[in-house]
Image (cartoon, helix red, strand yellow):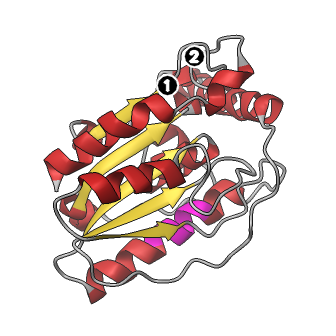
């Protein structure tokens, strides 16, 4: 009975984090463009954008991050836009995101044996990335698709921005912790519980350190 109470409490904390996301989401609709399989570049940057975030990879994090990576990485790279609703009103949004990321990585890993992956998530996309990595609070939700452990070594780095799971005290699994950068703006209510919603789109400062982390891992 005690274990059931703990599980119920932890799931409630996830719900709380999603509610915070709903309250601060102020972005326009996404472009809805399809994401295609990537070529066999050395690095495949897989980006899950935030809730209704404009831009192709995401105007707040994905687009500026990939632009920085193009100027930083010593090897070739391509970017993949995760094909999912990015809509907190869609109960299948998170699970569909994890399914798309996992299917994409499995496909690319088989097609390109030397390719490595950088998994990126902003806001709701960070929750998707947690699910792909098997973070407990998300992996236990229905329909979540996580990467098989034999692909762990193909993940060069993980980058999270405005991660709502920080409010629950959850981290990525230990297997990935040493190659993960988790960036949270001071006052961002989504990842700190602070009171300044404008800070949820203030992540320009994190692009360079995130790119440096990736460069050190590829």
Q: Is residue 171 visible?
A: no
Q: Which residue is mark 1?
A: 184
Q: Which residue is mark 2?
A: 192
Q: Is residue 213 visible?
A: yes
Instruction: Looking at this view, name the residue that lies furthest to the front.
Output: 71
Q: Are marks 1 and 2 in contact (CB under 8 Å)?
A: yes
Q: Tell me: 180 left or right of 56.
A: left
| Magenta stretch contains residue 99 | yes
Q: Residue at x 65, y 11 (%)?
A: 194
Magenta span: 97-102
Q: Quadrant of the N terminus?
A: top right
The count of marks equals 2
Determine which quarter of the picture holds residue 193: top right
Element at label 2:
loop
The spot of residue 146 in percent (x, y) is 44, 60
Work out how far the residue at label 1 is from the one at label 2, CA to CA, in angstroms: 7 Å
Sooner in the amino-acid sequence: mark 1 or mark 2: 1
Q: Residue at x 59, y 31 (%)?
A: 164
Q: Tell me: 163 left or right of 205.
A: right
């Amino acid at each position: 009975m005690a274990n059931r109470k703990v599980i119920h409490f932890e799931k409630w904390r996830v719900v709380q984090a999603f509610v915070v996301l709903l309250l601060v989401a102020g972005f326009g609709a996404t472009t809805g463009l399809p994401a295609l399989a990537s070529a066999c570049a050395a690095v495949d940057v897989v980006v899950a954008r935030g809730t209704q975030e404009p831009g192709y990879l995401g105007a707040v994090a994905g687009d500026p991050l990939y632009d920085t990576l193009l100027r930083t990485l010593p090897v070739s790279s391509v970017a993949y836009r995760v094909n999912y609703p990015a809509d907190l009103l869609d109960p299948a949004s998170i699970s569909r995101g994890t399914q798309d990321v996992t299917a994409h990585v499995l496909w690319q890993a088989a097609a390109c044996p030397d390719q490595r992956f950088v998994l990126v998530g902003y806001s709701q996309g960070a929750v998707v990335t947690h699910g792909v990595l098997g973070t407990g609070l998300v992996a236990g939700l229905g329909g979540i698709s996580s990467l098989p452990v034999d692909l762990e070594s193909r993940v060069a780095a993980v980058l999270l921005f405005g991660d709502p799971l920080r409010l629950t005290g959850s981290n990525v699994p230990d297997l990935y912790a040493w190659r993960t950068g988790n960036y949270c703006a001071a006052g961002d209510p989504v990842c700190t519980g602070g009171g300044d919603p404008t800070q949820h789109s203030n992540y320009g400062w994190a692009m360079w350190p995130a790119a440096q982390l990736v460069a050190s891992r590829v």
